[in-house]
Amino acid sequence: MAEAIETGASGKLNRRAVVRALLKDRAGLLVIGGLGAPAWDITAVGDCPENLPLWGGMGGAAMMGLGLALAQPERKVLVITGDGEMLMGVGSLATIAVQRPRNLSVVVLDNEHYGETGMQETHTRHGVDLAGMAKAAGFADARLIREAAEVHALREAIHAGNGPLFAQIKVDEKNEPLVLPPREASILQARMREAILGPEAHLQ
């Protein structure tokens, strides 16, 4: 039975519960967490070598996911990022759609705010439709999600590997306690390389 996903005071989904649902029984799923809250959220669910949380590089999460998906076509790759970060890197949607990696999913946790810089409103607060942009770019599957049941269906689609898949999930703007991953980028990169390539990764 699917675990319940709680909502916040706004009636929107709790972002950490959404991430927990998406990463449940993740198997070998490789996950990139965008700058800020998504990086804390994937860490809160459980830090592991298959996670690459980004401490910087705003706007680059989706393209990093594309590179990883192309380099590892037999592995499922999930990018979890925020609406502000995705708006900065919105051109990546066109590149991903043209490359058509079946093993790549991009999930945007859309709280309609820039959480790392003072909670200024993003353009999604005023009607900008990221899922619509992804669909127009040519994504095989682009969804706007507001309900818990849709999150559980999304998890199944991520593991089915019929991408590229894009999902914009409306989440509550409430801040969650910080759960920080390791800070050193070289450590994060090295442990993911070893998780993918084995011990010989350090000899390449």
Image: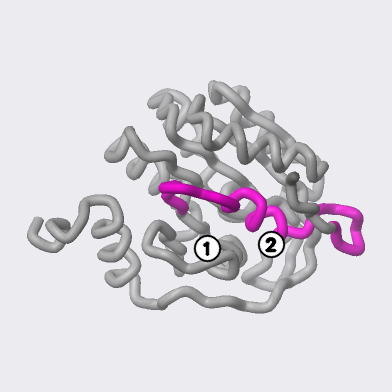
Question: Is the residue 117 above or below the residue 8 in the image?
Answer: below
Q: Is residue 105 left or right of residue 72?
A: right
Q: Quadrant of the N terminus?
A: top right
**Amino acid type of the residue that numbered disc 1 sits on in the rendered structure:** Leu
Q: Which residues are magenta?
A: 7-31
Q: Report how far apart the C-alphas of labels 1 and 2 lie in the structure.
A: 15 Å
Give x and y (percent) for residue 186.
28, 70
Residue that carries the numbered disc 2 in the rendered image: 16
- Secondary element at tag 2: helix
User: What's the residue at 43%, 33% (across, down)?
Assistant: 103
Q: Is residue 194 magenta?
A: no
Q: Residue at x 47, y 74 (%)?
A: 181
The kind of residue tagged 2 is: Arg
In the displayed structure, 77 sits above or below 137; it is below
Dot 2, crowdedness within 10 Å: few (<14), some or many (≥20)?
many
| Residue 48 shown left or right of residue 118 in the figure | left
Q: Nearer the viewer, residue 51 or 116?
A: 51
Q: Earlier in the sequence, mark 1 or mark 2?
A: 2
In the image, residue 138 lies at what x, y percent? 54, 21
Residue assigned mark 1: 35
Q: Does the magenta segment cover residue 8?
A: yes
